[in-house]
Image: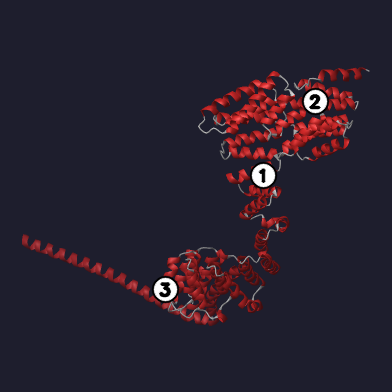
Amino acid sequence: MQLKNLKNKVNESIKKINKSIKEQKSTVLFKSFIIILVIIFLFLLSVLIINLSSIIIPEKVINKLWQTKDRVKDNLFKLAEDDYRKGYLENSAINYMRYLNNDIKKTEKVLVYKRLFEISVLQKKYDLALGYLNELESIDKKILEVYIYRIKLLLRLNKLDQVKEEIEKNKNRLKNSIELKELISLYYYKTGNFKESLNILNSIKSNKRDFNIHKIIFICLFKLDRREELLKYIERYEKKLNLILTNKQKSELYLFKALAKLSKNDFFNTVEILKKVKSLNENYESIADKLIIFCNMYDDQPGEVYDIITNKEEYVLTDLSIIKILAEYFIVKNDYERSIFLFEKLEEKRDLSKDEQAVITDLYYLKKDYENNIKSMEKLFYNYKYNTPDIYKNLSISYSMIDNTEKEIFFLKEGLAQYPDDLEFYMRLAKIYIDNDQPDNALNYINKAKIIFQRSKNRYEYYNKKLEILAFLASQAKKGSMTELELLELREKNEKNPESYFKTIEYYINNHQYKDAQREIETVSNIILDDKQKEILSNYKIMYNLGIDNLKGFEKERDFLLSLTDPSIKTQLNLAIIFLFEDDYDKSLEILAKIPDKEISHEFRAKILYLKALCYYYKQDYPLALKIIKNAEEKGLAAKKNSYLKGLVIKYLEK
């Protein structure tokens, strides 16, 4: 019984399972059926829509839709072209790239890549340009200009190894190309092989040579120093070329002809040819004028050179090398003023070198422009560390020229501290102290110099003699005024030194021995004097002529001193005194007013203020005279006679 129940249960379970399987099967089948129906429906719907479209939408409308797509593509091309023509290169390149993204023909692609190549070259994006050439080559290997452009671009970039590879690769392909021959000649030219460059160009038939080829031939002949051949070549083609060349090209032709003539030292004809260059093309006016300058320099025509400089300064004096050459040229011509002008122009454009600064320093001195001479020397000293004995000595001399004794002594002492064995410093300091009535200081330096001289290995008799004279002068200054005999002995010992004569002249004038003074003046006049010494002698001549009442002689020397562009302060003071004696107070005041205040010593300031006060006293302008005297006293610049003059002025004011 149990077995039967079990069997029944099993049967029921199997039935349930079968039922479940059947139900699942029917569900899957149902779903599959639904999917198939949807697919069939969609297919039928699409067929229906297509069929209906031909009925509802006309064929013309469909065509227009396709035409719109083409129109957008065409518009991109037109935009790119318009931007290219207007110079909007970046926009043009963007539109060309967008155009490339469309379905375009091979010919259109070639055109676009050529444009992109041109744009990248104009923008100096040379790597990009080479990339576009590669694209063109991949489209069509038969586009020969691709290889020409590549060689040109590599030549511009000076990638000569790659140029050589490209030439070798395409020699057979482009063997009949004149342009390739020209590029090969350029390659040899850039590598310095002018002979091979010339051989290549000569292989091109003369009727096939354009002006660029002629130009390279000109340059090669010039570089190979075949000037006669160059001249003959130019003259052979000159008439023919003149018929076809532009004015710019004619200018270039004549420039080469001028260079060939110049190399033969034919300066006259060179200048005439260069004038043609200027008349044909203003762009070559600058270089033509520069070459004309050189011609006139070689032909020794400084006036012509300076005319061009002054009339064409705006472009001639932009070339630094020419400015320097001209500055040095005018030194040779002893035209220091023009040389200074040119060195100053050079300095406006760049810092002068140490040597150039030294040259302009000397030029300022030669032109008696002592203030600029000092400034220039101080530049050498501080900026260029030009620390030599001469710089200290020269600074001292220049300060003496503007009567600045304080600075004159300062630089000698500075130089002595740096170069304690240089006897010149001791002797110059001794001389200054003798002239300034400080014999003890002078003897101190003389004695130190003697010690150095004794221990020196190279003893020059000049120094020994000079020290003896200085010691004698210092000793005499210490004991008082020198006698006539002592002065004459000094002059005999130092007969080539004008200063020893000046002392005897001064002695004779002070003692009214005018015949003896005249003898000494005539003797010293035959010695070579520098400008400073000529000025001193002229002062003595004025005193001499006043002493003998020689009005003409006096006026001659006075006018000479007035003619000096930069007389010393002592001379200016003497002139002011002379005009004061002549009752020309305004002239005296005018001279005193022109004396530069910057570099005047304490002693001279006091004298100037005293003389000004004296002039106003004689002009009867007592309030102003008193004001000047009081100002001098407040500044500690009262002269020895101030109190006496002050008393006179106050006396007249009280009246």
Residue 363: mark in rendering: 1
Q: Amino acid at mark 1?
A: Leu
When asked about the image quadrant of residue 531, the answer is: top right
Could you say where residue 485 lies in the image, as x and y percent from the top left?
A: 72, 25
Distance of mark 1 from mark 3, alpha carbons?
61 Å
Where residue 318 sits: x, y (%)?
65, 55
Mark 3 highlights which residue? 168
| Helix, strand or loop under label 2 | helix
Give the image location of residue 163, x and y in percent.
Answer: 45, 69
Quadrant in the picture for the N terminus: bottom left
Q: CA distance from mark 1 to mark 2?
A: 39 Å
Residue drawn at (61%, 68%), measured in percent from left and top?
A: 260
Label 1 or label 3, whichever comes before in sequence order: 3
Q: Nearer the viewer, residue 474 or 17?
A: 474
Q: Which quadrant of the figure contains the C terminus?
A: top right
| Circle 3: residue type | Glu
Tag 2: amino acid: Asn
Asked if labels 3 and 2 touch by Cβ distance under 8 angstroms, the answer is no
Disc 2: which residue: 510
Kindly tell me whether residue 513 is visible in this rendering.
Answer: yes
Which residue is pictured at 86% across the width and 34% down the height? 587
Q: Secondary structure at mark 3?
A: helix
Q: Residue 486: x and y, percent?
A: 71, 24
Mark 2 surroundings: few (<14), some (14-19) or many (≥20) residues within 10 A: some
Residue 595 seen anywhere in this rendered image of the structure: no
For the residues labelled 2 and 3, the Cα–Cα distance comes to: 99 Å
Between residues 469 and 582, which one lies in front from this camera angle? 469
